Image (spheres, rainbow, N blue to C red):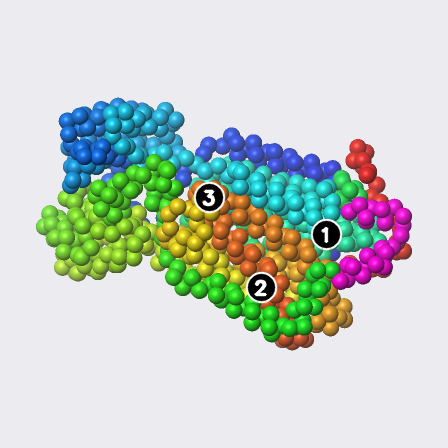
Amino acid sequence: MATILYRLGRWSFRRRRLVGGLWLAAAVLAVVAGATAPSGDEEDISMPGTESQKAFDLLDERFPQANAQGAEARLVFQAPDGEQVTSAANQAAVEDAIASLEGGAQVGNAMDPFEAGAVSEDGTIAYSTITYTESAVDLTDATRTALEDAAGRARDAGLTVAIGGEALDAEVSPGGTTEMIGVAIAAVVLVLTLGSMVAAGLSLLSAFTGVATAFGLVSALSVPLGLTSTVAILALMLGLAVGIDYALFITSRYREERARGADPEEAAGLAVGTAGSAVVFAGATVVIALMGLGVVGIPELTKIGLGGAGAVALAVLIALTLVPAMFGLFGNRVLSRRARRTARRGASPHPAAVARDRAGLGARWARFVLRRPLAVLMVAGLGLGVVALPALSLELGLPGDESKPVETTQRQAYDLLSDGFGPGFNGPLTVVVDLSTASDARSVTDHVVETLRDVDGVASVAEPVLDETDDTAVITAVPETAPTSGETKDLVAAIRSAAADVEDDTGATIAVTGRTALNIDISEAMSDALLPYLSVVIGLAVLLLMVVFRSLLVPVKAALGFLLSVGAAFGVLVAVFQWGWGADLIGIEQTGPVMSLMPILVIGIVFGLAMDYEVFLFTRVREAYVHGASPDEAIVEGFRHSGRVVAAAAIIMISVFAGFIGIHMPTIQTMGVGLASAVLFDAFVVRMAIAPAVMALLGHRAWWLPRTLNRVLPEVDIEGEKLRRPVPARAAVLVPAAPGDGQP
């Protein structure tokens, strides 16, 4: 592999204008395609095979006249203090607001709360459900304005009005202030690490090229493949983070080869052949982890994994081709000023500078760990264990309007409905009864209704609705408790248990569905899929790392270290999103269960990224070891070369992920906190402290590989042994500038 990548790096350097032009054209075409493509629907999460999803599918089949994709809104009215919404004046104001919507464009039905009995027992709160003929993303600005104007009519009459439902939900824009702050921090870290504005700009430019291409492709394919804005934002997040890091690693190796005396084209080839090999394997672990999300069986999660994997694959391709091309385009401006002065003089580095390099921060830290490996291992391991303790209280769920900021009208509507009709009103359960095999549809339906009313925890049961052929009955049951509470989860289990007895007696098929039941089913499916997913992903990645390191214990150590870091990240998620620690600092006003998708999504992404740092850091350790260094000397040498760069790459990735916390979208906020904390723990605690401590304790045993595996596993030469050849005497090797490129 190293030889192939070496040739690719040299070819890209020589054909720099062609390579740069092709990537520029690809990015422009992708952006244009994404900008001109129609917007995709923000689909609800589904879980094929679960009881709740089967019930949804049955409803679509038996009630085809109902538009399941149509948006819905709720106008919630509250009378002034001391008054009732049923008074003549207030009722007239409510009916006037609803009448302004009837017959409007895209409006299917506007319910009159006084005719439907949608008034609270104390008469202070009423609500109207407005159904639309189009999905939320297809509603026009005029339709949304009409809804807001209707609410304004009632407010002008003195009523408090809030709008719930998804009709006003807007697609989240991927751009924002906090993301730009994250990118700015990344730029500063690049400048400090590389000592060159041009080199820093090169890494950012290559990352932006990949991000623009990936984001444009996801947007263009949103309708054909059903991709949502979450997929696009994750592609942006991952593409930006790994794109900067991969370019940084190859650029650092290029500058190192130049410092050794290699000419520019040769240095580009060596950088891509060595650091580029690490990039390929690191990217492969991320892609494996993301593609593995498909084993869970949730279509949305599979799409998220595919989108993220595509963005990472693009970042790898750009790092291997566009980055060496830019080495040729930018000339010696990629080097630091000191390196350019040294190259012009044709002199070797000053002995004092070499000594400082050998005693750099990375080497000093490695020697500190080697002096007391057991103490470092105990302190770091116990520290992560303490941070991970809150993860024992992890609760999963899918957030709704209750998780939105209190100033939003959706959250206000949620609170008003809870006050007026009980906490369970916002999460009703839909019981679907398949009567096609029942002898007496009406009596069976009545039996189901009575059974539901006898279940503890059910606040009310509505009258059943049957289809035209009496083959299906739909019954709404309102819980006494909130949708995300543990009591509601127990209630769903109790209803399903009672329904099983009714099925045995009547021959009907009964299923419990609705958003609340679906959330519960998805959470349980996530828990059930976790071990199979970990087995598949970690197994494949460990095998891949065996090929890279020619070792059995190093990959196992890498995987176990990952479990520590991801456990600590889950502890942070519970502390912030469930317990509310520091929630105000990031704009989270309502605590609750952690999103059901987050554990397996964070595991998938972080595992790949954790293996990134393992590969980049310990390939240099192995390179020194195979060249004859002792185990301890190899660790010091590896940290001297890669410690500073890996630390910078981790800070960049943390900054990028943390920048997305400012997007007020539960999925993205949770992902930003989880990924940023996981990278922090993995890079600085696991890879920088625990890993070298374990390697020091293992000594030569760390690099042991059974003979059978040694014969079976392919040789990939990630250290670039076949590329090494005597370097000619150091000379002033300044890259010839292409016409118009300029020189410093």
What span is in magenta? Answer: 336-359
Q: Is residue 429 magenta?
A: no
Q: Earlier in the sequence, mark 2 or mark 1?
A: 1
Mark 2 → mark 1, Cα distance in angstroms: 23 Å
Residue kind at label 3, given as amino acid type: Thr
| Pick the front one: 179 or 710 | 179
| Pick the front one: 15 or 410 | 410
Coordinates of residue 156 in the picture (x, y in percent): 28, 25
Residue kind at label 1, given as amino acid type: Ser
Q: Which residue is mark 1?
A: 252
SS class, disc 3: helix
Residue 418 located left or right of residue 29: left
Badge 2: how crowded within 10 Å, few (<14), some, or many (20+)? many
**The C terminus appears in which quarter of the rendering?**
top right
Mark 3 → mark 2, Cα distance in angstroms: 29 Å
Q: Tell me the residue at 66%/40% (across/down).
A: 205
Q: Tell me the residue at 41%/49% (across/down).
A: 299
Residue kind at label 2, given as amino acid type: Val
Coordinates of residue 514 in the picture (x, y in percent): 28, 47
Coordinates of residue 523 in the picture (x, y in percent): 36, 56
Res. 215 image quadrant: top right
Q: Which residue is mark 3?
A: 230
Pointers 3 and 2 in contact (C-beta within 8 Å): no
Q: Earlier in the sequence, mark 1 or mark 3?
A: 3
Which mark is in front, 2 or 1?
2
Residue 409 located left or right of residue 83: right
